[in-house]
């Protein structure tokens, strides 16, 4: 599970973590980043990706048992198959 507690544990112990997230349910800022064609790198003819590091807040339980919000750095990676993106956006959308 990708709870704040599990994420914090992995960050503290210098382990990584990966989870997927729907673009459709994301914030406007994430959607704008994903749909901005800048900075994508090609992986052959059909695949593209880009990444960034952002600060994000997670909820954890501190030593006193109180829920607190802490800020962590999180790497976000966007990866897609060009054909699927064109189907979702429409073939006339030439951003990708």
Image (spheres, rainbow, N blue to C red):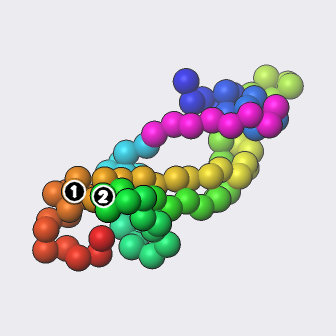
For the C terminus, the quadrant is bottom left
Instruction: Specify whether residue 57 is in view.
Output: yes
In the image shown, does 76 or 24 lie closer to the viewer?
A: 76
From the image, give the main secondary structure of the stretch colored magenta: loop
Q: Magenta part of the protein: which range?
A: 13-20
Q: Is 79 located above or below residue 69 in the figure?
A: below
Residue at 72% x, 48% y: name it: 72
Q: Looking at the picture, how far across and down is residue 36, in whole percent?
A: 40, 72
Whether residue 18 appears in magenta in the rendering, the answer is: yes
Answer left or right for 61 relative to 24: right
Specify the quadrant of the image occupied by residue 32.
Answer: bottom left
Instruction: Specify whether residue 33 is in view.
Output: no
For the N terminus, the quadrant is top right
Whether residue 63 appears in magenta in the rendering, the answer is: no
In the image shown, does 82 or 34 lie closer to the viewer?
A: 82
Answer left or right for 77 relative to 53: left
Q: Is 17 located above or below residue 36 in the figure?
A: above
Q: Nearer the viewer, mark 2 or mark 1?
A: 2
Q: Secondary structure at mark 1?
A: helix
Q: Which residue is mark 1?
A: 83
How many neighbours does mark 1 have within 10 angstroms: few (below 14), some (14-19), or many (20 or more)? few
The answer to which of marks 2 and 1 sits earlier in the sequence is 2
Q: Which residue is mark 2?
A: 46
Residue at 60% x, 29% y: name it: 3
């Amino acid at each position: 599970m990708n709870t704040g507690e599990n994420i914090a544990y992995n960050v503290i112990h210098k382990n990584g973590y990966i989870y997927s997230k729907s673009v459709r349910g994301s914030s406007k800022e994430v959607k704008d980043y994903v749909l901005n064609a800048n900075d994508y790198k090609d992986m052959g003819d059909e695949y593209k990706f880009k990444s960034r590091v952002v600060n994000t807040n997670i909820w954890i339980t501190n030593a006193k048992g109180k829920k607190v919000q802490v800020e962590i750095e999180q790497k976000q990676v966007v990866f897609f198959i060009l054909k699927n993106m064109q189907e979702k956006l429409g073939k006339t959308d030439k951003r990708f």
